[in-house]
Each structure stands twice: as C-alpha cells, then as structure tokens.
Image (spheres, grey):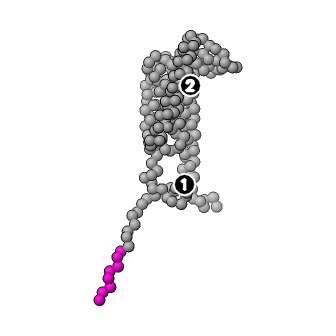
C-alpha cells in the first residue's frame, strides 16, 4: 500500500518591498511609496495658494485705494509704503516686457503644477512651498492680465519696491530648496545600513 502523497506547502506570493515602516520592523511595499500628490497634499496646496493670493490682492487694493500713484508713507527706518507700478517681474526685472513676463509666468506655473502632481509627497513642506510660489505667481499674473502691470508698495531705500506676492515667491522658493535637501538627506538615511557606522 503506497503512502498518501503529501500536500505541497502553499506557495508564498513574492512581494518586492522597498524601505521600512516607521517602526523599522515591517517593510513597506514599493507601491505604497508613490511620491505623487494625494488629496491631502492638493488640499494643502490650494489652501496656501488661495491664502497667499488673497493676502496679496487685499494689500494691493488697500494701497491703491489709500495712496495716489507715486505717493509714499514712511513706516520705520528705510521702510516705506510706496504706490508704484511694475510692468516687469519681481523687484522690477524685465520692466516694460509684460507679454514676455506673462508667457514665462504661465510656463513656470504649469511646470510647478506638473512637478507637484508627481512629487507632492516627497516632503511634508512641499505643499506649503509650492503653494506660496503658485499663490504669488497667480496673483501677479492676474494683475498683469487685467491691468497690464502689478502694484508694488513695500519699498526700502536700497532695494526696488516689491509686493507680498514677490515675498511669497521668494520664501516659497527657499522652502522648496530646504525640502529638497531634507528629502535627499532622509533618503540617504533610509538606505544606510545600521552597521555602516560601526
């Protein structure tokens, strides 16, 4: 009498995993590490961008409604509120080139949106950084399309006048750089062996 055939052990499904979970014990599937922006990232981006654009539009409205073109009110030290028109980009660059500025700004905005769609989860700071840049860029773009110029009003004696949108753009670019550096350092730390420091 022959022995009954032994049942083959169930085959385990092979799963390729990348990195590790936050508890450093359970690996995370590569599919769950997509860098594409999700609903939370898009929501944060929209909130920051809309707040930045609204703040910029409000301050321009107040300046234009309070001061005549060219008028200036001292605030403190070299800082003054000065109602001036700018047909260029931030800090007076590319003056009297509104058409070129509109095209360049539109291209930059589209590139930022594509970048964020693909990499919005790369670092938690990205929605804020990109939101500030987008909000400032969109606000100035709306003014150029509607008026042919933007209103600048933050004036230091030693620097060309600018507005809140310009400030948001500069701060946003700085935060973008910081988020890239932080994300690269985090990636390098994940890939390092625990024994590499021994």
The residue carrying pointer 2 sits among few (fewer than 14), some (14 to 19) or many (20 or more) residues within 10 Å by Cα, namely: many
Which circle's residue, 1 or 2, is located before the other in the chain?
Answer: 1
Magenta highlight range? 1-8
Spot occupied by residue 167 in the image (x, y as percentages of width and height): 57, 27
Asked whether the viewer can see residue 95, the reply is no
Report which quarter residue 142 is drawn in: top left
Spot occupied by residue 78 in the image (x, y as percentages of width and height): 68, 19
Residue found at the far bottom of this picture = 1
Q: Nearer the viewer, residue 85 or 198?
A: 85
* Residue named by callout 2: 164
The residue carrying pointer 1 sits among few (fewer than 14), some (14 to 19) or many (20 or more) residues within 10 Å by Cα, namely: few
Residue 119 in the figure: left or right of residue 196: left
Report which quarter residue 182 is drawn in: top right
Label number found at residue 22: 1
Rendered residue at 45%/31% (across/down): 109
Q: Secondary structure at mark 2?
A: helix
Spot occupied by residue 122 in the image (x, y as percentages of width and height): 50, 44
Spot occupied by residue 162 in the image (x, y as percentages of width and height): 57, 22
Is 86 part of what is drawn in magenta? Answer: no
Asked whether the viewer can see residue 55, the reply is yes
């Amino acid at each position: 009498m022959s022995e009954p055939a032994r049942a083959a052990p169930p085959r385990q499904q092979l799963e390729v995993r990348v990195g590790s979970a936050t508890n450093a014990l359970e690996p995370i599937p590569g599919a769950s590490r997509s860098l594409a922006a999700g609903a939370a990232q898009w929501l944060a981006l929209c909130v920051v961008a809309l707040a930045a654009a609204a703040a910029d539009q409000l301050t321009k409205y107040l300046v234009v409604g309070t001061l005549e073109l060219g008028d200036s009110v001292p605030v403190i030290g070299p800082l003054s509120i000065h109602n001036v028109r700018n047909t260029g980009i931030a800090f007076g660059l590319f003056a009297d080139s509104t058409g070129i500025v509109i095209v360049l700004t539109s291209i930059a905005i589209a590139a930022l949106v594509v970048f964020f769609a693909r990499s919005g989860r790369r670092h938690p700071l990205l929605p804020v950084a990109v939101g500030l840049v987008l909000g400032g860029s969109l606000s100035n773009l709306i003014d150029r399309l509607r008026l042919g110029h933007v209103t600048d009003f933050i004036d230091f004696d030693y620097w060309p006048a600018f507005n809140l949108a310009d400030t948001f753009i500069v701060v946003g670019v700085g935060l973008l750089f910081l988020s890239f550096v932080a994300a690269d350092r985090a990636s390098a730390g994940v890939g390092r062996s625990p024994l590499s420091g021994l």
